[in-house]
C-alpha cells in the first residue's frame, strides 16, 4: 500500500487505521515556523476528535533536516510517524 507498514513505533497500518474512514498525513518540519504554529492547533483538534470518539489517525511525514530535529518535533505529537529519512517523503 501507499503508506506501507514502516512506522517509528513499529505499528502496522491496520492497527493505526482501524475502522477510520480517513487517514491524515501531516507534512511538517521543525525548521518551519508556520508548521510549529500549526502543530499545537492540529493536536488540539485531534484531541477533540479523540474525546468525541471520532477516529482520525494521523501519520507525521517529516521534512526535518536531521534526526534530532525530527525527534524534537515528533515528541510534541500524539500520533504515528514515518521513520526519519523515509524515501516516500520528498
Image: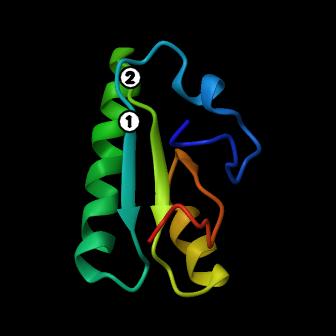
Q: Residue under circle 1?
A: 47
Question: Taking 84 as reference, is 6 above or below it?
Answer: above
Instruction: Write the residue at 43% across / 79% down.
Output: 30
Taking 58 as reference, is 36 left or right?
left
Instruction: Write the residue at 35% across / 38% down.
Output: 46
Tell me the tag on residue 60: none
How many numbered marks does the figure carry?
Answer: 2
Determine whether the residue tagged by mark 1 lies in a helix, strand or loop. Answer: helix
Determine whether the residue tagged by mark 2 lies in a helix, strand or loop. Answer: helix
Relative to the observer, which residue lies in front, 32 or 5?
Answer: 5
User: Based on the displayed image, in which of its 4 quarters is residue 52 positioned?
Assistant: top left
Please state the horizontal and vertical placement of residue 33, each as a whole percent of the image: 27, 82
Q: Quadrant of the C terminus?
A: bottom left
Taking 90 as reference, is 8 left or right?
right
Please state the horizontal and vertical placement of residue 34, each as a whole percent of the image: 22, 75
Question: Taking 23 as reference, is 76 above or below it?
Answer: below
The extreme front residue here reads 1
Q: Residue under circle 2?
A: 51
Label 2 near label 1: C-beta < 8 Å?
A: yes
Amino acid at each position: 500500500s501507499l503508506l506501507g507498514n514502516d512506522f517509528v513505533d513499529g505499528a502496522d497500518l491496520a492497527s493505526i487505521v482501524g475502522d477510520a474512514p480517513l487517514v491524515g498525513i501531516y507534512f511538517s518540519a521543525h525548521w518551519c515556523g508556520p508548521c510549529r504554529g500549526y502543530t499545537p492547533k492540529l493536536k488540539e483538534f485531534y484531541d477533540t476528535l479523540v474525546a468525541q470518539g471520532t477516529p482520525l489517525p494521523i501519520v507525521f511525514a517529516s521534512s526535518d533536516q536531521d534526526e534530532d530535529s525530527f525527534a524534537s518535533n515528533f515528541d510534541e505529537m500524539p500520533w504515528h510517524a514515518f521513520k526519519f529519512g523515509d524515501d516516500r517523503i520528498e
